[in-house]
Image (cartoon, helix red, strand yellow):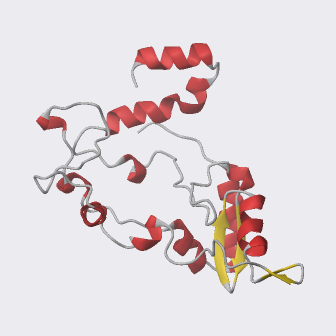
Amino acid sequence: MTERDFEWFESKYPGWYDEFGVWWENYAKLSKPGSVPITFADTGYVYPHRCWSSLVPCVIREDFQVDEVDGELYTYASEVDRWTHKEAFAAEYQGRPTPAMGRFSGRRQWEEVYDGWDLADAIQDMGFVRPDGKTLVAQPHLSFEEKDMWTLDHVRGHTIRSPLLALREMTPQQRQAHVEEYRKGFKIRRV
């Protein structure tokens, strides 16, 4: 985004800049090849957990839920998502058998599939590389200049970590503290 975009958003949504402006300034700064990918940069941003029911990031942090189903911990974006997985899709609901529809099984979250992988290797495995075998399909900017293009070399050295698997590895006390901190949200700082 440019200064013009910032002005437009601020005029339409007063307070927008205070909430989102620093993030977009960081994004512009870090969109240049050779920068740390913004998800891995020390900006204060806390990578979101993913909802096991809807598979969307849990960004309304005060609604974040954690529960156990069949002896395994899961994360949810809301109470309804938690209920859907734990209650509605259980083998029985209020003493009656439920249909086997929509069972939540398998490896549903990409972060879990690629946990421990180098970011460059995961991008390559997903097929998000252009025919030259090195340039990323998605670019963090709108420049079509060759010099601005990110390649696998620019993202190599960053390890993907699944928030869900990390949560499962915590002790109950660590998990409780983490969930409380996560629900508080975060404040973006300039890089």
Q: Is residue 16 left or right of residue 172?
A: left
Residue 181 versus residue 11 in the image, above or below: below
Which residue: 74% across, 54% down?
63
Residue at horizontal 59%, vertical 25%? 16
Residue lying furthest bottom:
71
Viewport quadrant of the C terminus: top left
Residue 66 lies in quadrant? bottom right
Q: Is residue 170 above or below residue 81?
A: below
Number of numbered labels in the structure image:
0
Give x and y (percent) for residue 69.
Answer: 70, 80
Give the image location of residue 6, x and y in percent: 48, 20
Question: Relative to residue 141, is residue 43 drawn left or right?
Answer: right
For residue 29, side relative to residue 149 (left or right) = right
Residue at the limit of the structure toward the right, as seen here? 94
Q: Give how far across and how far down residue 37 sits, in percent.
A: 34, 49
Q: Quadrant of residue 71?
A: bottom right
- Viewer-closest of 145 and 175: 145
Of residues 73 and 179, the one nearer the viewer is 73
Q: What residue sits 38% from the left and 46% below the top?
A: 38
Quadrant location of the N terminus in the rendered image: top left
State the image quarter where residue 53 is shown.
Answer: bottom right
Q: Is residue 23 left or right of residue 187?
A: left
Where residue 74 sits in the image (x, y, percent)? 64, 72
